[in-house]
């Protein structure tokens, strides 16, 4: 295992999120309803000094990753439904006790807790707690894992507890994003947000322990890994102008059968299926990055992924991402606008 997961804590500075105040309320129900739009539906119970409860939630968007700062001012318990994304809670102050599935995790200032998808959790927080939370889409994690190593990583599960000495890469990436955001009077540029998002993903996958850490951090153990790595490099270099699989085998100097066996052994799919998945992911990422009203699905599909049969492309895209490419392109701005959050909960 490489020692990328540890850096000196003194180089990391994380704190409040600048820019948008998502909610500031003394009503626990309103706080729970707004936060549910970021995480998952949950029950929030206030304990101790109920008069001291004041939920202040700030929000920053990095591509498709949400960075949210929580401060409630009271002891509380949160019982949440399973997430459909990953979440990382960094304890900036105070302490929490979290039940992730059947595992109990106690975290204090400087520690972190990682929640993987589809696992229910319950946490209790001290009165002085202050947290910084990352919410990361599952597709973003699996796609980035494929770029870091040759193989399929669609079921990554993170070790829940991260002590204060670990996770240096992701902490530094988040601290950099916050520093850049604090230096601006407006929102981060979209392109910069996506670059920071990629750094956060790399930090998570390289610096936090998970079910595929060994595959990502260790050197390949046999020649088939090298075949796979070279083939996927050829694929990534030719996403917009796909080349036949036999030509890829010829370029890297192996028989077609050897190439097919390498993909079957390590990716559980054919080279052609993997190539198409890489092209679909490239189109998805580009559609997420496009903000111009003049952008079109056709242009992105052709120039980024080399898809010429748009009807077939649209069906294959929806199978992988659960929505049509036009929905991705015309999605509402990320996050929940303040006006929407408050008016939806206060009809008056």
Image (cartoon, rainbow, N blue to C red):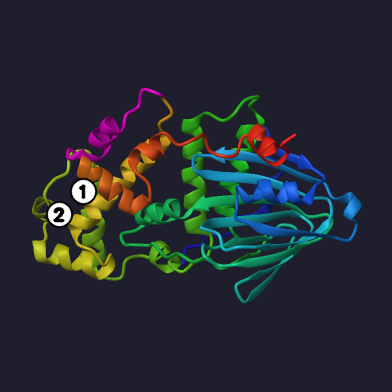
Q: Which residue is mark 1?
A: 234
Q: Is residue 304 magenta?
A: yes
The residue positioned 49% from the left and 43% from the top of the image is: 64
Where is residue 50? Give x, y as percent: 88, 55
Asked if residue 151 lies left or right of residue 178, the reply is left
Q: Which residue is mark 2?
A: 252
What is the CA distance from the residue labelled 1 to the residue labelled 2? 8 Å
Where is residue 292? Give x, y as percent: 41, 25
Asked if residue 229 lies left or right of residue 85, the reply is left
Q: Residue furthest bottom?
A: 102
Where is residue 93? Give x, y as percent: 77, 54
The residue positioned 57% from the left and 45% from the top of the image is: 66
| The C terminus, quarter of image | top right
Q: Is residue 126 magenta?
A: no
Asked if residue 272 lies left or right of residue 199, the reply is left
Q: Nearer the viewer, residue 83 or 222?
A: 83
Span highlighted in magenta in the image: 293-310
Viewer-nearest of discs 1 and 2:
1
Q: Is residue 279 above or below residue 265?
A: above
Under tag 1, what secondary structure? Answer: helix
Q: Is residue 270 above or below residue 345?
A: below
Q: Nearer the viewer, residue 41 or 8?
A: 41
The residue positioned 52% from the left and 34% from the top of the image is: 333
Q: Is residue 342 above or below residue 72?
A: above
Residue 331 seen: yes
Residues under numbered marks 1 and 2 in contact, where contact means CB atoms less than 8 Å apart: yes
């Amino acid at each position: 295992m490489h020692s990328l997961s540890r850096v000196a804590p003194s180089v990391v500075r994380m704190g409040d999120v600048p820019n948008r105040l998502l909610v500031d309320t003394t009503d626990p129900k309103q706080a729970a309803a707004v936060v549910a739009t970021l995480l998952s539906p949950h029950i929030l119970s206030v304990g101790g000094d109920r008069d001291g409860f004041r939920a202040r939630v700030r929000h920053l968007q990095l591509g498709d990753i949400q960075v949210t700062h929580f401060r409630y001012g009271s002891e509380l318990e949160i019982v949440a439904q399973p997430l459909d994304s990953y979440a990382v809670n960094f304890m900036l102050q105070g302490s929490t006790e979290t039940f992730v599935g059947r595992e109990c995790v106690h975290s204090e200032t400087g520690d972190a807790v990682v929640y993987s998808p589809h696992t229910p959790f319950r946490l209790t927080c001290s009165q002085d707690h202050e947290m910084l939370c990352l919410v990361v889409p599952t597709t973003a994690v699996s796609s980035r894992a494929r770029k870091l190593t040759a193989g399929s990583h669609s079921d990554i599960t993170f070790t829940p507890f991260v002590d204060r000495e670990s996770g240096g890469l992701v902490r530094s990436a988040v601290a950099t994003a916050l520093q850049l955001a604090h230096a601006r009077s407006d929102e981060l540029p979209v392109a910069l947000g996506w670059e920071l998002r990629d750094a956060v993903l790399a930090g998570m996958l390289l610096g936090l322990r998970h079910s595929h850490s060994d595959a990502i951090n260790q050197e390949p153990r046999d020649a088939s890994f090298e075949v796979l790595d070279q083939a996927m490099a050829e694929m990534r270099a030719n996403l917009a102008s796909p080349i036949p699989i036999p030509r890829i085998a010829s370029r890297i100097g192996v028989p077609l059968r050897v190439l097919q066996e390498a993909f079957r052994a390590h990716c559980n799919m054919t080279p052609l299926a993997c190539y198409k998945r890489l092209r679909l992911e490239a189109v998805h990422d580009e559609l997420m990055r496009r903000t111009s009203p003049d952008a079109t699905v056709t242009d992105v599909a052709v120039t980024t992924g080399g898809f010429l049969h748009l009807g077939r492309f649209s069906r294959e895209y929806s199978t992988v991402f659960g929505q049509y490419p036009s929905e991705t392109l015309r999605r509402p701005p990320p996050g929940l606008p303040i006006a929407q959050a408050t008016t939806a909960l206060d009809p008056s």
